[in-house]
Image (spheres, rainbow, N blue to C red):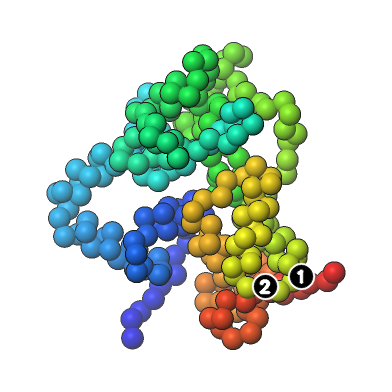
Amino acid sequence: MRCVRQILISTNVFAMIWSVRQSGEESEDQILRRILADFVSDPRANLKNEQTVGIMDRRNEVHFSEGFEVFRNMAGKEVCAVVQGGEWWIKGTQTRAASLNGLSRALSRNNENAWQVWFYLDDHGKRVPVSSLRPRKKRSLSRGDRPMMEKSRPTLPTVRWCDDVREALRVLGGTARLDDIYVTVEKQRSQAGRSTPTSLPAVVRKELEQRSSDSEAFLGGDDWFKIAGEKGEGIWSLRFHSD
């Protein structure tokens, strides 16, 4: 019997693990086993890969890891970009750039501060300007370099992934199959202007399991969800639900 250990990782890291999943891999253990096995087999080759994968902005002292996603609104439409092979790629296009500023120039001729108009989701699912990743000394902004606030958007309370999952179950009547939960969470996040990564199903399952005393992954604390029906059947419900 294989020994299993539980580790704590942020939602962003969890999503990145699933973003590099290959066909046939059904767990984090399988994904990481392949990646780490490749590294151990040839550490010198992988040292070179480690230096080239992702983007290191030395001026701002920020490293964007492979798979890191940013987004912004342009003409009422959300534009997303992701780090792939050491470059920024705009999703759904062949447009690429070597830096965040280059990414902005590829989309607009306006003179803008790219670090203030591009956003990412932090560990709590909160929309945050990329400038927050810079060391504190780099974030001492002058009056003309302050974040550009979207006038039409009021300041909203922080909504976490787990809040989206709980609200989805409430909307679905307190009990639902995983596929229905995925669809409802994606709809809620889209309507609220939050990103919906391809790893959404994996993130939703993680939130359910880590907040359910029925699961081996339970972290303690919030015990919002419970397994309904047979284990493995893919049906979840709110532990305490009232209409």
**Amino acid identity at mark 2:** Ala
Q: Is residue 29 above or below residue 153?
A: below
Residue that extends furthest to the right in the rendered view of this protein: 243
What residue lies at 53% left-to-right and 31% top-to-bottom? Answer: 118
Q: Which residue is mark 2?
A: 176
Q: Which mark is residue 158?
A: none
What residue lies at 40% left-to-right and 70% top-to-bottom? Answer: 26
Q: In the rendered image, which quarter is residue 176 located in?
A: bottom right
Q: Are marks 2 and 1 in contact (CB under 8 Å)?
A: yes
**Amino acid identity at mark 1:** Gly
Provide the secondary structure element on which disc 1 rests. Answer: loop
Residue 240 in view (yes/no): yes
**Whole-percent x, y for residue 222 in the image:** 67, 66
Provide the secondary structure element on which disc 2 rests. Answer: strand
Q: Which residue is mark 1?
A: 173
Image quadrant where one finds the C terminus = bottom right
**Whole-percent x, y for residue 70 in the image:** 50, 38
Q: Nearer the viewer, residue 157 or 90?
A: 90
Image quadrant where one finds the N terminus = bottom left
Query: Label 1 crowding class (10 Å Cα cut-off): few <14, some 14-19, many 20+?
Result: some
**Whole-percent x, y for residue 141 in the image:** 56, 20
Residue 64 in view (yes/no): no
What residue lies at 60% left-to-right and 62% top-to-bottom? Answer: 182
